Image (cartoon, rainbow, N blue to C red):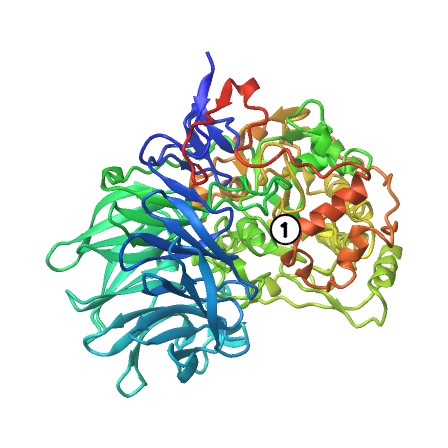
């Protein structure tokens, strides 16, 4: 008998343990009444929801309570709350900022854009929005949170570090006020004429404080390079002065003024807490949101509704309800949401939660694509019946039987899905119709998978390099980053924005704190050359082996001080053979000394594509570098107790028949099993969890604590057989056709930056498809509820299931 699977609506309530025997081999997507996400969490809330096919970041409910306005990375959507259907939408040409939307009446919506605008939308009787006007808040202002007071609005200008007052009648800026660093969210105390705003970068650093740059402003950082603190500022509207700033943990986000108890509430995402602040004295009470012994719950959104406090908790996919106990707020009940909730609001029926990542990469409204760039964010309605006891998944047990390994080499590559590379492997779950860089182009990676283990159920949680490198090195991402996809105005971060990162830190921070050694080859480095030549000329020169001086540019001091100076990082005009030449030079000295770092990162980005040669040449270049690296390591004196992980930062470069997040991971070493295909669920956090266990460290954070360690990949008996590099079968200097979509795309892109993917990833993917599978139609079957392959799993789609499009 076939089981009916309601795609878009899942059954049950509360968090479900993901990694028990029943789900050990589960793939991302709908299965057995739950929805498995790429980070290993499950979605199982009942009720109604809207799929937005975007990334929702903020929301507001109209004064009448009939509709809600949803802000996402593309514009504004209007939601009818009675039917939970979208009734209108407006798309921005200026991008959309991370927060900031409000009603000034039932038919007037105001929202901030990513560039410099405060836009006014007017709704017709059917709820369809029309742009009525816009207010220019200044170039590079990046306006975020706003509150409306009568015919005036107050807006946080994140990059200008200012608060702006705007006259909505004359559509003009009245005045601005300098405040702290990166002002974000606002709340209004009408009775006393004051505004409280969160400052994500905190107060200006005092002399002698270690600092780093965030969007051109120096921010106080700790020795790891992570922002030290945030702040909440009080501004008097009577005399337009900054009254005080009250320090908070880093990344204060949503703020709410509780007039009933005269207190300011602020969600501190990097502190696992909500602070209750007495504005008169500045004294603080802590409301702990931790979900266990590890940090990383990420409380983000706040709302005071009917004398209750609601908190959106992004790291554990929950909304918590808190009650006033006479002196403070205490937890009362919890409800499960979809992936990564960041904002909450009240309705007549209950609570709305905006979930940035929603259901992952399902995209029923885009029948032409199916990859990690397809977002299926959701607006979830939570009724009182859905709130109950907090029930958290148990952390998978540590694997105490890991063999003795002393050296970990962690290779970070760029942007490939599983099917793109290994779709041609007959013994694994691949789709050869989606394979673009198979055996002929990647002989070394195929040989490594055959010699050691083939992982066909491995996922990246990120969708492009900005969040992908955080997942790969931190095992988590912050709301600051997840909300930035409407326009990366402050940074398209690659180690160069201290506000981006989690307070729990990077994998190397944990190792260094224990006294272990770390060496970095290229990660978080923007490599620039002073050579006066084209990208093609520079690539061919580096491919030839000629030495070139590159300027190293690494924003995080803790990485910079442990990096090899002449090994270049990101720049698509640098061949990976040049990187391997520099690695081999340095490794000769390591061999001679007999001392190798405990933990080594090697950045090999050429499989990203988008540079001066054809996609096949880029990927083949990368493949040969991977083969050279493993051959060198496996023939070294350190191989006997080494393990090598080869990971992608994200899978944004193509399609996959299982899920847009499914990617490649290679694991090699004397204690790694041989010739096996392993289909257990693993993700980037699993790699970091396993590295921690190899070195006897606790998990980095709550997310890596929930990740399954990769103990099943190892055996107790060492096999010292080295890896023999395979020569390239694709010319590494082959250019793309001058008239191809690929050549047209990269012609105006700065290949020294990550601009290649921060623009139009779908367009690049189509160009790569044309180049790698000429004459074939771009795959369009991998969309929406993703019904392909359900039959053989004993499942069928429930076509009557209610979702946001019914």
How far across and how far down the image is residue 242, in percent? 32, 83
State whether residue 741 is above or below residue 753.
Answer: above
Position in image of residue 162 (x %, y %): 42, 79
* Secondary structure state at the residue bearing disc 1: strand
Image quadrant assignment for residue 105: bottom left
As drawn, is 386 to the left or to the right of 376?
left
Label 1 neighbour load within 10 Å: few <14, some 14-19, many 20+ = many
Number of disc labels: 1
The percent position of residue 380, horizontal first and vertical second, equals: 37, 44
Q: Quarter holding the C terminus?
A: top left
The answer to whether residue 352 is above or below residue 451 is below
Quick check: 99 above or below 410?
A: below
- Give the left or right position of residue 360, taking residue 183 as reference: right
Q: Which residue is more in the foreground, 77 or 44?
A: 77
Residue in the foreground of this view, choosing between 684 and 451 = 684
Which residue of the protein is positioned furthest toward the bottom in this rendering?
A: 239
Can residue 451 be spotted in the picture? Answer: no
The answer to whether residue 110 is left or right of residue 240 is right
Residue furthest toward the left? 326
Residue sitting farthest toward the top: 1
Q: Nearer the viewer, residue 62 or 390?
A: 62
- Asked whether residue 771 appears in the rendered view, the answer is yes
Q: Which residue is mark 1?
A: 600
Closer-to-camera residue (620/319): 319
Q: Quadrant of residue 285?
A: bottom left
Residue 800: % across, % down = 43, 27
């Amino acid at each position: 008998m076939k089981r009916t699977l309601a795609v878009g609506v899942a059954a049950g309530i509360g968090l479900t343990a993901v990694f028990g025997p029943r789900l050990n081999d589960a793939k991302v997507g709908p299965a057995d009444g739950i929805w498995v996400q790429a980070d290993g969490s499950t979605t199982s809330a009942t009720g109604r929801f809207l799929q937005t096919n975007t990334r929702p970041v903020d929301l507001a409910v109209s004064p009448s309570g009939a509709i809600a306005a949803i802000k996402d990375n593309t514009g504004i959507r209007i939601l009818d709350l009675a039917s939970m259907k979208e009734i209108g939408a407006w798309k921005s040409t200026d991008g959309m900022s991370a927060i900031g939307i409000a009603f000034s009446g039932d038919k007037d919506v105001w929202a901030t854009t990513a560039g410099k605008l405060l836009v006014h939308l007017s709704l017709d009787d059917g709820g369809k929005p029309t742009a009525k006007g816009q207010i220019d808040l200044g170039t590079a202002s990046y306006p975020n949170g706003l509150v409306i007071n009568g015919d005036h609005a107050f807006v946080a200008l994140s990059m200008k570090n200012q608060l702006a007052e705007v006259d909505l009648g004359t559509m003009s800026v009245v005045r601005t006020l300098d405040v702290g660093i990166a002002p974000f969210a606002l709340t209004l105390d009408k009775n006393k004429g004051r505004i409280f705003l969160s400052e994500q970068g905190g107060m200006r650093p005092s002399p002698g404080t270690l600092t780093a740059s965030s969007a051109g402003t120096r921010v106080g950082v700790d020795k790891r390079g992570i922002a030290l603190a945030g702040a909440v500022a009080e501004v008097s509207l009577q005399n337009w002065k900054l009254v005080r700033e009250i320090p908070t943990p880093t990344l204060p986000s949503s703020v709410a003024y509780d007039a009933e108890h005269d207190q300011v509430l602020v969600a501190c995402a990097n502190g696992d807490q909500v602070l209750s602040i007495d504005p008169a004295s500045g004294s603080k009470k802590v409301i702990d949101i931790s979900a266990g012994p590890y940090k990383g719950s990420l409380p983000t959104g706040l709302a005071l509704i009917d004398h209750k406090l609601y908190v959106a908790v992004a790291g554990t996919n929950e909304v918590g309800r808190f009650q006033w106990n006479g002196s403070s707020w205490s937890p009362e009940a919890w409800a499960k949401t979809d992936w990564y909730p960041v904002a909450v609001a009240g309705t007549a029926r209950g609570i709305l939660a905006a979930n940035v990542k929603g259901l992952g990469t399902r995209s029923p409204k885009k029948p032409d694509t199916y990859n990690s760039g397809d977002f299926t964010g959701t607006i979830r309605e939570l009724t009182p019946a859905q709130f109950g006891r907090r029930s958290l998944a148990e952390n998978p047990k540590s694997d105490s039987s890991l063999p003795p390994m002393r050296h970990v080499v962690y290779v970070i590559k760029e942007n490939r899905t599983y099917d793109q590379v290994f779709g041609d492997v007959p013994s694994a779950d691949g789709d050869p119709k989606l394979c673009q860089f198979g055996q002929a182009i990647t002989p070394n990676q195929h040989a490594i998978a055959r010699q050691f283990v083939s992982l066909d159920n491995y996922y990246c949680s990120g969708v492009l390099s900005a969040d992908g490198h955080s997942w790969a090195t931190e095992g988590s991402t912050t709301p600051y980053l997840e909300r930035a996809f409407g326009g990366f105005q402050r940074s398209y971060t690659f180690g160069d924005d201290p506000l981006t990162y989690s307070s729990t830190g990077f994998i190397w921070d944990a190792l260094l704190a224990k006294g272990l050694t770390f060496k970095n080859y290229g990660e978080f480095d923007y490599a620039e050359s002073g050579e006066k030549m084209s990208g093609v000329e520079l690539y061919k020169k580096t491919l030839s082996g000629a030495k070139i001086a590159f300027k190293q540019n690494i924003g995080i001091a803790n990485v910079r001080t442990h990096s090899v100076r002449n090994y270049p990082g990101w720049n698509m005009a640098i061949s990976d053979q040049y990187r391997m030449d520099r690695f081999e030079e340095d490794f000769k000295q390591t061999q001679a000394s007999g001392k190798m770092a405990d933990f080594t990162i090697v950045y090999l980005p050429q499989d990203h594509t988008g540079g001066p040669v054809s996609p096949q040449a880029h990927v083949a270049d990368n493949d040969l570098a991977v083969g050279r690296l493993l051959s060198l390591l496996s023939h070294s004196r350190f191989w006997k107790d080494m393990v090598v992980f080869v990971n992608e930062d994200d899978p944004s470069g193509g399609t996959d028949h299982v899920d847009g997040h499914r990617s490649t991971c290679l694991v090699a070493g004397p204690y790694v099993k041989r010739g096996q295909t392993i289909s257990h669920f693993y993700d980037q956090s699993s790699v970091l969890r396993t590295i921690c266990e190899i070195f006897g460290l606790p998990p980095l954070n709550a997310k890596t604590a929930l990740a399954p360690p990769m103990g099943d990949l190892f055996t107790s008996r060492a096999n010292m057989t080295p890896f023999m590099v395979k020569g390239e079968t694709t010319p590494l200097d082959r250019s793309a056709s001058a008239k191809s979509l690929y050549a047209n795309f990269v012609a105006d892109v700065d290949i020294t930056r990550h601009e290649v993917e921060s623009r139009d990833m779908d367009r690049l993917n189509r160009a790569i498809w044309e180049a790698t599978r000429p004459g074939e139609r771009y795959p369009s079957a991998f969309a929406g509820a993703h019904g392909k392959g359900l039959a053989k799993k004993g499942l069928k789609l429930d076509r009557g299931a209610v979702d946001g499009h019914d």
